[in-house]
Image: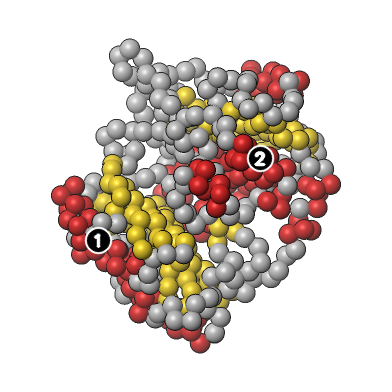
Amino acid sequence: MEIVYQPYIDPEFQSLLDRIHPPRICIDNDAFHDCTLVKVVDSANRHGILLEMVQVLTDLDLVISKSYVSSDGGWLMDVFHVTDHLGNKVIDETLILYIQQALSDPRRRGGEIPKELQTCLKRDVKPCHVSTEHTALEITGRDRPGLMSEISAALYELRCHVTAAVAWTHNARVACIIHIEDGLMGGPIMASKKLAQVHEKLESVVEAHHESGERWSIRLTAPAAGRTHTERRLHQLMYADRDYKQCQGCDGSCRQWNGCTNTHVTIEACREKGYSVVNIRCRDRTKLLFDTVCALTDMQYVVFHAAISSKGTITDQEYFIRRQDGCSLNTQSERQKLAQCLIAAIERRESRGLRLDICTQNKMGLLSDVTRVFRENGLSITRVEIGTQAERATGTFYVTDASGHEADLRTVELVRQEIGGSVLRVYRSPNGTSRASSSSISRNSSGEVEERAKFSLGNLLWSQLERFSENFGFIKS
């Protein structure tokens, strides 16, 4: 049994360098008519800081349509073109102030979104971070229909109240993080006997359909002082479970989009500067930049320069990277593994099936009740995010039929009636017949998505960064 008590690491020590050399933040609403410019200048450079900056913006449900990054030497400059999820500029003064404070002070990064800001964003309650107040349960293994229902039913049987849960499925593997508390006494589960009971019960659930040599991992984590970003942790869990092994993107022979639905990843050497150049071309979606930067960071690669541009439903990303030891990617096997891992990071969050948004009264056994209704009606969960706040519980479920095909709407309507009036919206995911993007979609007169020429960092990055740094000023909102 693996029950983990995490050591305490003083966050003040980790952020010391950032506090000695705080970055200058400029939020400019005058430079472009269709987006807000967020510039981070003179930031002390360290491994992982780019991911933290991107995380601040994506946790606010802001859409990053373009970005330029330069971090040669000990200093960093980041430029982000952002809008809200409706494509509007960021003009709310409360939101602007929060972004400034979060980007300039590392102690504010990774914290929960303040309630007044959630009201401003009209944002549902979502579990952004592994809880510091509840016991965290992490499970990885082979996915199967009804698994989430079986797990949540087992927790309810043990009188464990689920306060938040997030689960992703990819390549027949599943990773989930469930925050639980004692359903009778409240608060985290600290008694080793109760933790052992939970672990034993869940082992029996996951091994009920066990195959020889099947990989499973069940991990209970006691509350810790530091915060772990839930989505980053899910990427780490699925990477450790090797879900990337079956990933295959475009073989490189397809230089144009031409309707190809695969993700394009190429890795080449820039021998003059000692970089490896990673180019990614794929369909655009929310939090795509976070996912790719997360993969690079957790695989111990350092991003020295980057240029990201989204247009319509397509995004191009170009990274100049080295390993953390300063070396470029020298072997074909290393390049192939990185390409597979980037494809996996892009695919994990892709929404498959019908999306159901739920808002209802918070009660013990709620997740068990909802997932049981899905299972009894032959629906399989491909992704779930659910959180609770006081008396309210909100969540999002993506469901397919048991074969992985799109669920029948009549079945979903029966499910909605059985659950009650708590299902707010039911609509098709972007991976269906009509693909939607968080960015604005540009189409020509024939209705086709407009394409653009190959995006090159070498032709654009330095002129853009020079112009942005020269125009650096105070907030213009």
Position of 320 relative to 135 (above/below) = above
Residue 380: image x %, image y %?
A: 28, 57
Q: Secondary structure at mark 1?
A: helix
Identify the residue at image location x=64%, y=17%.
Answer: 459
> What residue lies at 69% left-to-right and 29% top-to-bottom?
475
Image point (40%, 60%), residue name = 393
Position of the C terminus, as image quadrant, is top right
In the rendered view, tell whether residue 409 sits above or below residue 476: below
Could you say which quadrant of the image residue 40 lies in? top right
Q: Residue furthest left?
A: 410
Question: The disc labelled 2 sits on which kind of residue?
Answer: Leu
- The local crowd at label 1, few if under 14, some if 14 to 19, many if 20 or more residues have their Cα within 10 Å, is some
**28 is higher (above) or lower (below) than 173:** above
The numbered mark at residue 143 is none
User: Residue sitting at 53 percent across and 38 percent down?
Assistant: 62
Per the image, the residue denoted by label 2 is 97
Alpha-carbon span between mark 1 and mark 2:
40 Å
Could you say where residue 152 lies in the image, as x and y percent from the top left? 36, 70
Helix, strand or loop for disc 2: helix
**The furthest residue to the bottom:** 193
